[in-house]
Amino acid sequence: MEPARLRALLARSPGLLAAHLNTACPGEFSPDLLQALLAGALPPRVRRRLEQPDETQIDADLRWAEAAGVRVLCCRDSEFPATLATLSWAPAALYLTGSPGELSGGPWLTIMGARQASAAGCDTARRMATDLAAAGVGIISALGEGIAAAALEGALAGGGRAIAVSAAGLDRTHPVQHARLAARIREHGSLVSQFPPGSPPRRHHFALRDRLSCALGAGTLVVEALAGSGLGVTAATQLRHARRVFAIPGSIRDPLAAGCNQLIRRGATLVQDPREILRELGINNIFQYVTARPKSAAGPHGAAPPLDNKYEMLLDAAGFEPVDIDVLAFRTGWSGHTVASMLLLLELEGRVAPQPGGRYCRL
């Protein structure tokens, strides 16, 4: 079987893992790989797929890959990330756009976080990714909502490389609202998926996507996560396997900070600045390119104008965690109507942002 066709068959075989190929054929990819696989022990459904391939489907996959500029990378290919190929759960093949060498080149950092993230959390992820990308660190994240999208946008804004890992086949964009972001990543990075074309984003795909995202990076930064969430479990697993995990701390009263605080308690490295991540990863030669952010907030036309004392008092009462109007009215002693009017002005100036549940978050 010709190499391109064999790669398409391996990628289409559900349950086929890198471990199966490593056992059957420890060397680099070769046309004899199929015979070596069939001579060894395989799960029944994998064996059936390899012995009786759907030739029509493989033809369709090859046509789609050529038209879409998608490569199928086998775990025995030299461009396949070496650290990923040694993991027992790693898929036998990946679909990707761009150059396969992107995956094995480095350094790369994975940024993860909650889908329903706060405005402050998204801003943190975006700023961290922008500074790290400017320093030469590639950013990996899920093609998802919240922190993931903010991190990818930050990487592109910093003029760096970005890899977005999808929970669906690369013939579709999920979520659909990120079609423009996915198009930009195609131009300035890579889209990656372990799922063949036509695969919808099934529920169990998201955990697999997050696990793959973490495995591709030299470390993982978690910006926001709920306690006990699947995201936190994935990051905790990275800790157990001696992988580098970084976490942004938060208020003990903020549910979105609970997962990060738990990770720090379990051994994750507390970070507040991208330079701390560069030091931990041993990236000293590009450290000087990351500069500290100015303390004053800046609007679209430069530095934001100073606020009068009453607005400063409202911001102090808000703190740095989501809070609703009733709480602010209680803390300040002002009417709810007064607080709401002031929050509207602060929102227009980019000082606060609305959050789910009628709450506001200081930026």
Image (cartoon, grey):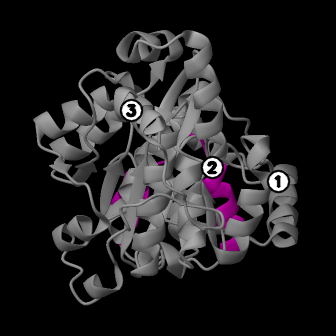
Q: Quadrant of the N terminus?
A: bottom right
Q: Residue 267, located in which quarter of the rendered image?
A: top left
Provide residue 48's location: percent of width, then percent of height.
Answer: 63, 39
Q: Are marks 3 and 2 in contact (CB under 8 Å)?
A: no
Residue 55 is tagged as 1
The correct choice, above or below, for 140 with respect to 355 in the image is below
Q: Residues within 10 Å of mark 3 (few under 14, many from 20)?
A: few
The correct choice, above or below, for 166 with respect to 299 in the image is above
Circle 1: element type: helix
Circle nearer the N terminus (2, 1) = 2
In the image, the segment drawn in magenta is: 1-26
| Dot 2 amino acid type | Leu
Is 15 colored magenta in this rendering? Answer: yes
Q: Residue at x 57, y 15 (%)?
A: 357
Q: Which of labels 3 and 2 is toward the front?
A: 3
Circle 2: element type: helix
Specify whether residue 76 is in view. no
| Dot 3 amino acid type | Met
Circle 3: element type: helix
Q: Is residue 14 left or right of residue 128?
A: right
Would you name the residue on which mark 3 appears? 313
Q: Residues within 10 Å of mark 1 (few under 14, many from 20)?
A: few
- In whole angstroms, how far apart are the C-alphas of marks 2 and 1? 11 Å
Residue 92 or 151: which is nearer the viewer?
A: 151
Circle nearer the N terminus (3, 2) = 2
- In whole angstroms, how far apart are the C-alphas of marks 1 and 3? 69 Å
| Dot 1 amino acid type | Glu
Q: Which of labels 1 and 3 is toward the front?
A: 3
Residue 286 or 233: which is nearer the viewer?
A: 286
Would you name the residue on which mark 2 appears? 50
The correct choice, above or below, for 160 with respect to 353 in the image is below
Residue 26 or 346: which is nearer the viewer?
A: 346
